[in-house]
Amino acid sequence: MMDCIFCQIVAGKLPSETLYQDEEVIAFRDIHPLAPTHVLIIPKRHIPSLAQLTDAETPLIGHMAKVANKLAQEEGVAESGYRLVVSSGEQGGQIVPHLHMHLLGGRRLSDKLC
Ligand code: DGP
């Protein structure tokens, strides 16, 4: 999906501050950070949103969470605490139509989820 910004990052056609990658996922810093640590963990293959995840792809979410936990440790926020967010669809606040998980930490996050 070469009209997808995140697919272009995966392909190396758009720059990103990549922190981690393996066969399944890549993680890079959000371009508009909302917290001192704001990293996006995305699948390398184009999956439009959580709502489009197939049964076979379900383990990918666990893998993304595991990578997020590892990055939280590396970023020094594992002990202080952090939040993982997956927005799905328009009313869920998803802007980029490529499944992604936000890792947010490094400051006291709002008690309100929305
Ligand atoms: P969401 O609202 O959940 O779809 O979040 C999309 C996030 O993607 C948003 O926080 C900004 C980030 N983002 C958008 N375009 C780029 C980009 O080209 N590079 C990087 N690093 N982040 C981007």
Image (spheres, rainbow, N blue to C red):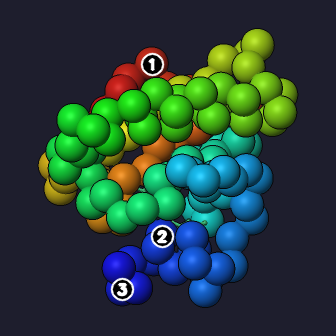
Distance from disc 1 to disc 2, alpha carbons, whole Å, reads: 29 Å
Can residue 33 be seen?
no
Q: Is mark 1 within 8 Å of ligand 1?
A: no
Mark 1 residue type: Asp
Q: CA distance from mark 3 to mark 1?
A: 36 Å
Disc 1: which residue:
111
Residue ID at (36%, 64%) = 46
Amino acid carrying mark 2 in the image: Phe
Quarter placement of the N terminus = bottom left
For numbered disc 3, what is the local secondary structure?
loop
- Cβ of mark 2 under 8 Å from ligand 1: the answer is yes
Q: Which mark is residue 6?
A: 2
Residue ID at (32%, 34%)? 58
Vertical comparison of 24 with 56: above or below: below
Q: Position of residue 60 (x, y in %)?
A: 43, 38
**Residue 46, above or below 78:** below
Q: Which residue is mark 3?
A: 3
Circles 1 and 2: CB atoms closer than 8 Å: no
Residue 48 percent location from the top left of the image: 27, 60
Left or right placement of residue 23 versus residue 21 in this view = left
